[in-house]
Amino acid sequence: ISEIIAGSTAEIPRVFDTLLAGIPYDDYVAAANTDPAVRRGKIGPREWLYRSSLLSFVRGTGLSVDAEIHNRHGRADMVIRGYGKTLVVEIKIAATAGDAEAKLAEALTQIKERDYAAQFPSALTLAIVIDDEQRKIAAWK
């Protein structure tokens, strides 16, 4: 992913999709069966599994990455920094592939309305939708 950040961010969803393909099925089941108090929270049990997996992967590349970066209107899921670039990432989970476009629009709107990139001059933004049924990237922009 380091080379991708240095060059083009267009390949990031493909790289993330490869990572998601390697998460054991049992981990998804365990996430779905978490304590009811966690399920009632704002972050669904599978969303934290996806986000944490992607976060750990990016950290392993040596890039600087932080999760849940707060600003005056909310918090971005991830902010990745490296090679003179900053990438603000918002992740949404779609129940099925048919929900992906609506979730993508929601993520893009959230990035803009909550002004996630404002504190990072010339940051790029990336909205990613993960199809929970197929457990892979369904849409991105």
Image (cartoon, rainbow, N blue to C red):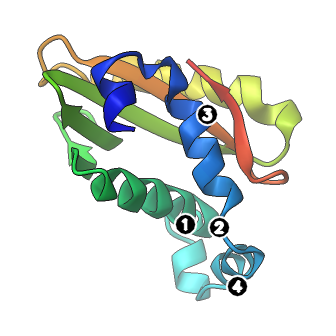
Q: Residue furthest front?
A: 3
| CA–CA distance in space, label 4 to label 3 | 28 Å
Mark 1 sits on what residue? 49
Kind of residue sitting beneath label 3: Arg
Which residue shows up at 85% across the image and 44% down it? 96
* Residue 102: % across, % down: 72, 25
* Of residues 43 and 10, the one drawn nearer to the viewer in this rendering: 10
Residue 140, can we see it? Answer: yes
SS at mark 3?
helix
| CA–CA distance in space, label 2 to label 3 | 15 Å
Asked if marks 2 and 3 touch (Cβ < 8 Å), the reply is no
Q: Earlier in the sequence, mark 2 or mark 3?
A: 3
| CA–CA distance in space, label 4 to label 2 | 16 Å
Marks 4, 3: nearer the viewer: 3
Mark 2 sits on what residue? 23
Asked if marks 4 and 2 touch (Cβ < 8 Å), the reply is no
Label at residue 33: 4
* Of residues 61 and 106, the one drawn nearer to the viewer in this rendering: 61
| CA–CA distance in space, label 3 to label 1 | 18 Å
SS at mark 4?
loop
| CA–CA distance in space, label 4 to label 1 | 12 Å
Mark 3 sits on what residue? 14
